Amino acid sequence: MLSEHRATRRSVLKAVGGISAAMALGGAGVLASAAPAGAVGDGAGLRIVDRREDDPRMWYYRFATEAIGWQPAVNVLLPDDYHTSGRTYPVLYLFHGGGTDQDFMTWDRLPGGGIRAWTAGKPLIVVMPDGGHAGWYSDPVSSNSGPRNWETFHMAQLLPWVEANFRTYAEYDGRAVGGFSMGGFGALKYAAKYPDRFASVSAHSGPPSLRRDLGAVAHWANVSAAALDLAGGTIYGEPWNEAKVSADNPIEHVETYRTKRVFLVAGTSPSPVDAFDLLNETEVLAGQREFRAGLDQAGIPHEWHEEPGGHFIRPEMALRDLDGIVARLRRA
């Protein structure tokens, strides 16, 4: 497994997104009123400035939005039979990790075909948006590089845009959220902060605690975002905006996961000679163990895996996760 995915691991290890790695529409029993195929349009504060729809499964869009000071993109991966079945599908929002080589295409660039191969034949739409090099799936306390409001972009704009343009279930049991590293944190955060939005949440080497170890993850979010995205601005402020840290901290909202499928993966043997790998996955593993203890204490079921290796995406765990997502969500 490690040798097969060495290229992916090298890419991930370059990432400095670090330990990485109400507003949306929807309601129970409500179906999205999607536009016909080929008629995807603007909406929810998003104006399409570039698009590509010639691939039968992977459709690409780039937007102008007041939430982000540049033009973020999204890949929408459609089921094999989307154009012929007429069916409505559940949807997975899948987030990338942090770093200058991480973006909306990360999950499609993995060895062996990546997300396209893993979802072949599965009745599931997968939405993979930009999240910034170190956006931390948050609206920052401060930015010196223009707006970088990733939470607003994802939850107030992208989610309703998807549901207006594609045949998805606009309801709790129709949505899942997941991600790797910084994206795993984002998935856990959104699932807790918007508890009526997602019925399944997955964190692949994603940290669930901002405050443990003297706030290591929150500090890293500030440092990495200041360097890569915010030109010296910060996600949580210096000193911290304590209310914002608590609002974003998954482990402080354990009860919100009670009705969800929860899937967690962490590595147990990061490279001892690679500081990035060692520091990242050591923090992830400790945080996930603390989070799992909180779930256990609350009597909340969850699936967890501790796997050999360090901070990288594990295809066998991604495949297991996808099968679990399809089983949990409303059937197409």
Image (cartoon, helix red, strand yellow):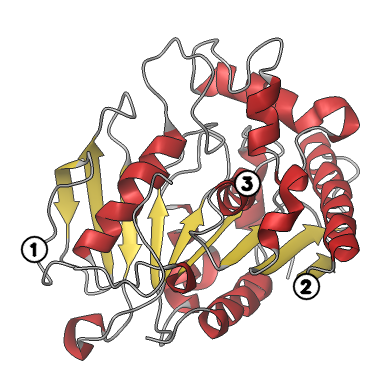
How would you rate the neighbour count of disc 1 (Cα within 10 Å): few for under 14, some for 14-19, many for 20 or more? Answer: few
Between the C-alphas of marks 3 and 1, the distance is 36 Å
From the viewer's perspective, tell me whether residue 92 is left or right of residue 74: right
| In contact (CB < 8 Å): disc 3 and disc 1 | no
Q: Which one is nearer the viewer's eye here, 143 or 229?
A: 143
Q: Position of residue 284 (x, y in %)?
A: 80, 47
The first of marks 2 and 3 along the sequence is 3
SS class of the residue under badge 2? loop
Q: Which residue is mark 2?
A: 301
Of the 4 image quadrants, the one containing the C terminus is bottom left
Q: Which residue is mark 3?
A: 12
Q: Position of residue 279 (x, y in %)?
A: 83, 38
Q: Which residue is mark 1?
A: 39
SS class of the residue under badge 1? loop
* Number of marks present in the image shown: 3
Q: Position of residue 325 (x, y in %)?
A: 55, 76
